Image (tube, rainbow, N blue to C red):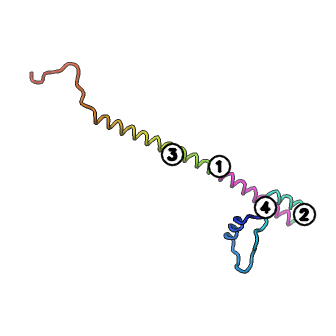
Amino acid sequence: MFQLSANEFENLKSQIATSNWGGRRKPPNAFTEHGVLMLSSVLNSEKAIKANIQIMKIFTKVREVLVDTLSLKLDIEEIKKKLQNQDKNIELVFSYLDELIEKKENLDPRKRIGFKQNKNA
């Protein structure tokens, strides 16, 4: 069991309705997953066992969601990096094309070599 920090407590208070005249004045205590397991070994009623099972299911689900969210974030970051690299590559290709177009426009007409026909004859 641990006590919530002031920042966590403020976040919790903003998510639930508290009255101006009542409610908590100091941060509440919270149980970790292992704390819930230890508590269930002390409490031995049917209701406590059912509550413990539900809490453990919730902890498991939260862990799965966190893992899924983390892997999703990593995949999104990888896609962003690939897109940034592709943008740079596309810009590079267009700059090369611009250079080639400029070179072609600035070239002097080439002298033809080989057999020349006399147009007047």
* Labels 3, 1: front one: 3
Q: Which mark is residue 55?
A: 4
Sequence-first tag of 3 and 1: 1
* Helix, strand or loop under label 4: helix
Q: Which residue is mark 1?
A: 71
Image quadrant for the C terminus? Answer: top left
Image x and y of residue 69, in percent: 65, 53
* Labels 1, 4: front one: 1
Callout 1: 10 Å neighbours few (<14), some, many (20+)? few
Relative to 70, residue 88 above or below:
above
Question: Which segment did they paint magenta?
Answer: 47-72
Q: Check if mark 2's residue and mark 1's residue have beta carbons within 8 Å.
A: no
Q: Main secondary structure of the magenta part?
A: helix
Whole-number angstrom distance, CA of label 4 to CA of label 3 = 43 Å
* Labels 4, 3: front one: 3
Q: Check if mark 3's residue and mark 1's residue have beta carbons within 8 Å.
A: no
Q: Which residue is mark 2?
A: 44
The total number of labels drawn is 4
Give the amino acid at mark 4: Ile
Give the amino acid at mark 3: Gln
Please state if 103 lies on the left or on the right of 75 as rendered: left
Callout 2: 10 Å neighbours few (<14), some, many (20+)? few
Front residue of 92 and 55 = 92
Q: Check if mark 1's residue and mark 4's residue have beta carbons within 8 Å.
A: no
Instruction: Examine the image and state in which quarter residue 27 appears.
Output: bottom right
Sequence-first tag of 1 and 4: 4
Sequence-first tag of 2 and 1: 2
Q: Residue at x 78, y 64 (%)?
A: 3
